[in-house]
Image: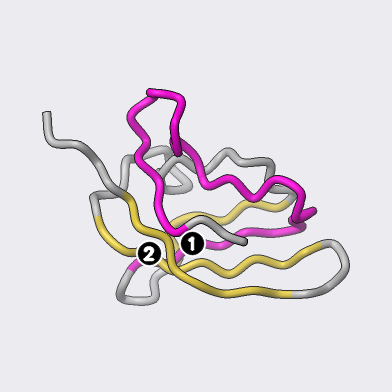
Amino acid sequence: MVQKGISPNNDGLNDSFDLSGLDIRKLEIFNRYGKEVYSKSGYTNEWMGQTDGGDELPTGTYFFMFERNNGETQTGWIYINRQEK
């Protein structure tokens, strides 16, 4: 099962997109306009709501596609919840 949201605030709870145990070959994240904002081969739970350049993405819904090492693909959505300071 793939989580539906992250809250990247460094509290140790849901800070990253946790795909442990899914043996991910490649992860791609897209904004609501379909623009790729993040891509990683050999993904190991590094995505904490940032772009490829390291900039924080705003609160909102993003879409993902990942490919597992066995060739299976999955798509879905993930919500970034950034707490207002």
State the residue at coordinates (49%, 55%): 38
Callout 1 touching callout 2 (CB < 8 Å): yes
Kindly state the secondary structure of the residue where label 2 is placed: strand
Q: Which residue is mark 1?
A: 29
Q: Residue furthest left?
A: 85
Q: Dot 1: what SS?
A: strand
Q: Residues within 10 Å of mark 2 (few under 14, many from 20)?
A: many
Q: Relative to 73, is 29 above or below?
A: above
Q: Residue at x 31, y 76 (%)?
A: 33
Residue 47 placed where, x, y %?
51, 43
Q: Dividing the image into 4 quarters, which one contains the N terminus?
A: bottom right
| Of the pair 19 and 37, the residue shown nearer to us | 19
Which label was assigned to residue 62? 2
Q: Is residue 37 above or below residue 48?
A: below
The amino acid type found where label 1 is placed reads: Ile
Q: Distance between the Cα atoms at labels 1 and 2?
A: 7 Å
Magenta region, residue range = 4-31
Residue 82 image offset from top left, x and y in percent = 24, 41
- Left or right side of 29 for 56: left
Magenta stretch, overall SS: loop
Quarter the C terminus occupies: top left
User: Which label belongs to residue 4?
Assistant: none
Q: Who's the residue at 51% across and 55% down the image?
A: 3
User: Residue 16: horizontal and vertical position, in percent?
Assistant: 49, 40
Picture quadrant where residue 79 is located: bottom left
Q: Please, which residue is most extreme toward the top here? A: 11
**Image: 40 above or below 71:** above
Give coordinates of residue 18: x percent, y percent.
Answer: 58, 45
Residue 54 location, quadrant: top left
Instruction: Find out whether residue 41 is within the magenta segment.
Output: no
Identify the mark nearer the N-term, 1 or 2.
1
